[in-house]
Image: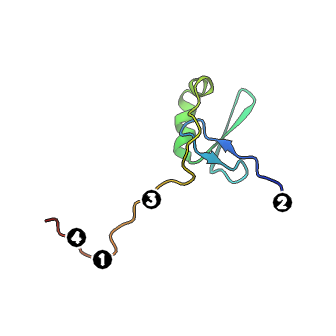
Amino acid sequence: MPAKLDKKTDPVCGMSVDPVSAPAHVEFEGVSYHFCSHHCARVFSVDPAKFRRHPAPPSPYRFRSVKSAPTSGEPKEHR
């Protein structure tokens, strides 16, 4: 049986991230923080102590919502 992955919570947005495949990592005062995106890592880097004192609560959503572009070449007509 495979070992359960040790998920971490992005302290900026609260998303669950896999430390091994997380897109960004920042070390602050000897602790490694893992982020869902480079954007969250940059936000954290501006004031890491703030997020250490008040991390975002874990997100209840597993995945981000992604808006898809219209499939046809013409925009839909509004009525």
Q: Of label 2 and label 3, which has the lower sequence position? A: 2
Q: Tag 1: residue type?
A: Ser
Tell me where residue 2 appears, x and y as whole percent: 83, 60
Q: Residues within 10 Å of mark 2 (few under 14, many from 20)?
A: few
Foreground mark, 4 or 2?
2
Is 55 above or below relative to 14?
Answer: above
Name the quadrant containing residue 51.
top right
What secondary structure is found at the residue carrying circle 4?
A: loop
Tell me where residue 76 appears, x and y as whole percent: 22, 70
Q: Tag 3: residue type?
A: Val
Residue pictured at 50% horizontal, 53% vertical: 64
Residue pictured at 55% horizontal, 45% vertical: 60
- Residue 72 image label: 1
> How far, Cα to Cα, is label 4 from label 2?
48 Å
Is 15 above or below relative to 53?
Answer: below
> How far, Cα to Cα, is label 1 from label 3?
18 Å
Q: Tag 4: residue type?
A: Lys
Figure label count? 4
Q: Which residue is mark 4?
A: 76
Q: Which residue is mark 2?
A: 2
> How far, Cα to Cα, is label 2 from label 1?
44 Å
Q: Are marks 4 and 1 in contact (CB under 8 Å)?
A: yes
Q: Which residue is mark 3?
A: 66
Q: Are marks 4 and 2 in contact (CB under 8 Å)?
A: no
Residue sitting nearer the eye, 75 or 39: 75
Taking the image as shown, residue 3 lies to the left or right of residue 76, namely right
What secondary structure is found at the residue carrying circle 3?
A: loop
Q: Quadrant of the N terminus?
A: bottom right
Residue sitting nearer the eye, 76 or 50: 76
Q: Tag 2: residue type?
A: Pro
